[in-house]
Image (cartoon, rainbow, N blue to C red):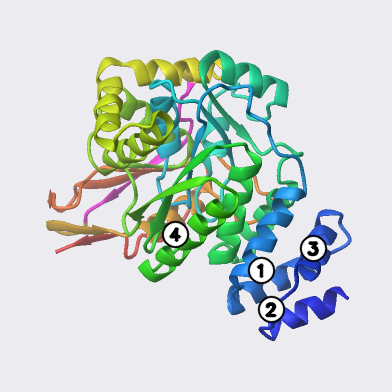
C-alpha cells in the first residue's frame, strides 16, 4: 500500500486525503520508515501538489496533535513566521518589539532547516534558556508578560515536527507545498488569530524565484482564509545575508544590538516592517500609526526591556553569552569596491564551521559562525578584513570562493 502511494506520486497522479493520511500518519507511528518517507517527499518536490492535496495535508498535520487554546487572552494574538534565510534573526527582534506594544505574541518556533540555525537553536545558545515549555507555563507567561517563544510541543502538530526534521537532511526543504502546509499547520495549531509571514526569496533562501514566492504567498492566504485567519505577507530579498552576524550566539548578540538602537540597515528596516504589520493587525490601527509606535519603543528602550524580561522568564542568562571559538579572518586579496556578498556561499561556509546541521541528529556548535565586517559599496583595500570566522574545528580548510565580489 505504501509503495503504491509513493509510486502514484512519483508518476505525478493526484493523491486522495485518505492516501496522504495513510503515508503521513504511518510515518508518525513509525510504520513508514525514513527511507520510504524520503522517497515520497522527493516525489512531492519533483511533481508538486495540487491545492486540494495541500489543504488536505495541512489538515492532517493539524489533526495529528492538539490545538492550543489561547482564548484565555482577551486580545488579538498575532504570530509571525519567516520561511528562513541567512542571518535571519528577525523573530528575536520583532517578538519583544510587538509585545512591548501590548500585542501578545505566543510563538512556536523550529530548529534549523537547511544551512543555518532556527529561532529555537538561537535561543538555546543563551545559557540556561528553556525552550520546552508546558501548556501551563505558556499560559502563565503569556498572561504575565505577553510574550512566549517555545519549541513545538509533542502535542502540537507532531507530524509536521517529525517531517520537518527529515526534510532538513534530505534536500526536500524547498518544496512550496511542504513549506505552506508546515507553516500554516503550526500557526493554526498554535492558536494565532492573525499571522504575518516573511517570505524570503533569493539564492540564500529556500525559495529561489519571485514566481515561487508569489505562489507560496497565494497558498498561505488561501489556507488562512479556509481557517478564518487573516494572513499578511512580506516578500524580502535573500540574495545577501540579513545583518552582519551568521551563527546562533552571534545572531542573538546582533539582535540585542538592534534592540539597543546600535544597528541600522536592512535588518532593522525589515524588523520594523514586520512589527508594524503585526501591531496594526493586533490593535486595528493603520500601519503608519503602528510604525510610529514600534520605532518609539526601540528609541525608549521598551522593546529591549521586554526582550530582557522574556529571556529571564525562560531562565536565560544573557549576561553570560560569550563566544568560545577560534577566530580566522578573511582578508581581501585585491582593492576595489565591494559589489556583492553571496548569501548561499556564506550559508555553506557557516555550516562548515559547525553552525548548521548536515544530518538530523547533528549537534550545532552555538559558538560557530561569521561576522561580516564590510558593507556593499564599501571601498576595499587589499589586506582589509572582510569577515571573521568563528569555529572550534581544527585544521579547517575553508572554501572562500564566490563569497565577496570586489571590482
Extent of the magenta region = 321-332
**Disc 3 target residue:** 21
Q: Is residue 64 left or right of residue 280?
A: right
x and y percentages locating residue 306 in the rendered image: 43, 18
- Where's the N terminus, which quadrant? bottom right
Q: Is residue 324 magenta?
A: yes
Q: Residue 217's mark?
A: 4
Q: Is residue 178 left or right of residue 163?
A: left
Q: Give above or below for 328 relative to 298.
A: below
- Where's the C terminus, which quadrant? bottom left
Q: Give above or below for 221 relative to 192.
A: below
Q: Are marks 3 and 1 in contact (CB under 8 Å)?
A: no
Comes first in the chain, label 2 or label 3: 2
Q: CA distance from mark 2 to mark 4?
A: 22 Å
Q: CA distance from mark 4 to mark 3?
A: 25 Å
Q: Are marks 1 and 4 in contact (CB under 8 Å)?
A: no
x and y percentages locating residue 260 in the rendered image: 30, 22
Amino acid at each position: 500500500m505504501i509503495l503504491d502511494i509513493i509510486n502514484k506520486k512519483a508518476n505525478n497522479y493526484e493523491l486522495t486525503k485518505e492516501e496522504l493520511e495513510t503515508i503521513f500518519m504511518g510515518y508518525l507511528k513509525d510504520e513508514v520508515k525514513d527511507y520510504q518517507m524520503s522517497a515520497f517527499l522527493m516525489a512531492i518536490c519533483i511533481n508538486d501538489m495540487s491545492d486540494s492535496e495541500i489543504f488536505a495535508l495541512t489538515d492532517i498535520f493539524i489533526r495529528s496533535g492538539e490545538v492550543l487554546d489561547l482564548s484565555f487572552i482577551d486580545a488579538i494574538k498575532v504570530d509571525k513566521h519567516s520561511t528562513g534565510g541567512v542571518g535571519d534573526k528577525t523573530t528575536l527582534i520583532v517578538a519583544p518589539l510587538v509585545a512591548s506594544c501590548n500585542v501578545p505574541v505566543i510563538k512556536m518556533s523550529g530548529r534549523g532547516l537547511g544551512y543555518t540555525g532556527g529561532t529555537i537553536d538561537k535561543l538555546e545558545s543563551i545559557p540556561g534558556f528553556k525552550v520546552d515549555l508546558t501548556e501551563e507555563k505558556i499560559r502563565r507567561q503569556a498572561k504575565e508578560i505577553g510574550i512566549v517563544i517555545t519549541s513545538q510541543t509533542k502535542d502540537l502538530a507532531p507530524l509536521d515536527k517529525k517531517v520537518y526534521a527529515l526534510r532538513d537532511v534530505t534536500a526536500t526543504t524547498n518544496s512550496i507545498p511542504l513549506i505552506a502546509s508546515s507553516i500554516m499547520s503550526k500557526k493554526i495549531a498554535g492558536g494565532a488569530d492573525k499571522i504575518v509571514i516573511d517570505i524570503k526569496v533569493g539564492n540564500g533562501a529556500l525559495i529561489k524565484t519571485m514566481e515561487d514566492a508569489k505562489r507560496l504567498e497565494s497558498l498561505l492566504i488561501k489556507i488562512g482564509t479556509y481557517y478564518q485567519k487573516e494572513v499578511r505577507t512580506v516578500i524580502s530579498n535573500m540574495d545577501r545575508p540579513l545583518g552582519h552576524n551568521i551563527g546562533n550566539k552571534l545572531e542573538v548578540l546582533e539582535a540585542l544590538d538592534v534592540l539597543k538602537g546600535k544597528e541600522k540597515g536592512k535588518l532593522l528596516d525589515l524588523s520594523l516592517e514586520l512589527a508594524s504589520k503585526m501591531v496594526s493587525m493586533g490593535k486595528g490601527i493603520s500601519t503608519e500609526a503602528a510604525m510610529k509606535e514600534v520605532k518609539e519603543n526601540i528609541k525608549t528602550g521598551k522593546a529591549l526591556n521586554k526582550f530582557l524580561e522574556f529571556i529571564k522568564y525562560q531562565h536565560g542568562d544573557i549576561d553570560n553569552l560569550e563566544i568560545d571559538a577560534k577566530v580566522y579572518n578573511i582578508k581581501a586579496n585585491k582593492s576595489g569596491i565591494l559589489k556583492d556578498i553571496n548569501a548561499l556561499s556564506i550559508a555553506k561556509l557557516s555550516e562548515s564551521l559547525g553552525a548548521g546541521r548536515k544530518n538530523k541528529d547533528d549537534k550545532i556548535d552555538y559558538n560557530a559562525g561569521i561576522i561580516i565586517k564590510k558593507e556593499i559599496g564599501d571601498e576595499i583595500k587589499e589586506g582589509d578584513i572582510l569577515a571573521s570566522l568563528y569555529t572550534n574545528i581544527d585544521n579547517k580548510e575553508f572554501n572562500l570562493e564566490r563569497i565577496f565580489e570586489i571590482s
